[in-house]
Image (cartoon, rainbow, N blue to C red):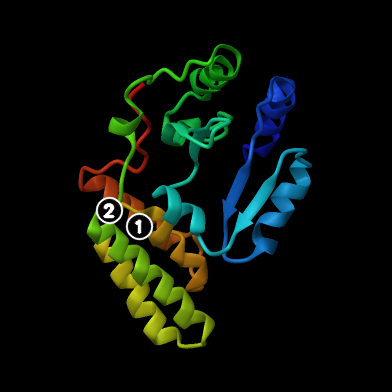
Amino acid sequence: MDLPVWQEVHQELAPLGFTVISVALDKDPEDARPWIEAASPTHPSLIDTEYRLAELYNIVNVPTVLWIDEQGRVVRPNDVMFASDAFVRIHGLDPAPRLDAVRAWVRQGTTGIEGEERELQSLPSETDQMARAEFVLARWLRDQGRTEAAERHFRRAGELAPHDFTIRRGSMPLRGIDPMGPVFREMITEWVGSGHSYYHPLPK
């Protein structure tokens, strides 16, 4: 949904050395392809069917944005960032300040969290890592046609890391469940109703 706006940001800032790299986490490239083709991005647009990005950077929900500098260092870690206000009535996050922050980083070299990068970086616990292992095993079992065994491990992964929606919601298409349907809505209602937040943007 936000790809057209990211394309505009890329075109604006590419002459200054900035590159947007968008990555869709999907069970099949064909699920993301229509959105990418409709946006016609000139920046790299990748599809991660193995959820490797979530594992490498401890991404627990989408959209998550990371700022990575020329040396490959994460200078602003996992942040919730929408590029458009299409769903602002749902998430309540104004995209304009974050987009302005990206422009300030590219043009002036400021991230807004200088010296706090490590403190703000979310690291997976041992239990989180176990949940990810369960998720990987469940996907393998599914690919082998062992759907009942896969279901047990998908459920176990979600139980170990209930905050990780790249696992809980990400498993839904793999299990034949609509990730925008009633099961997802019920899950979110229960999660938020228990006093948890669905999105965790950086505090500044």
Q: Is residue 199 left or right of residue 126?
A: right
Q: Residue at x 51, y 87 (%)?
A: 145
Do the residues bearing badges 1 and 2 touch, measured as CB atoms within 8 Å?
Answer: yes
> Residue at coordinates 77% horizontally, 38% vertically from top-left?
42
Q: Give the residue drawn at x 36%, y 63%.
A: 132
Q: Position of residue 163 (x, y in %)?
A: 30, 52
Q: Is residue 58 above or below residue 8?
A: below
Q: Nearer the viewer, residue 89 or 3?
A: 3
Q: Amino acid at mark 2?
A: Glu
Point out the residue furthest to the front here: 71
Q: Residue at x 38, y 19 (%)?
A: 114
**How far across and how far down the image is residue 130, in percent?**
29, 65
Judge whether residue 190 can be spotted in this image: yes
Does residue 180 appear in the picture of this structure? no
| Quarter of the image where the C terminus is located | top left
Q: Label 1 vs label 2: CA separation? A: 6 Å
Q: Percent from the top left, x then y, of residue 27? A: 57, 65
Residue with the mark numbered 2: 190
Where 145 falls versus 77 (above or below)?
below
Q: Nearer the viewer, residue 21 or 116?
A: 116
Question: Where 60 sits versus 100, above or below?
Answer: below
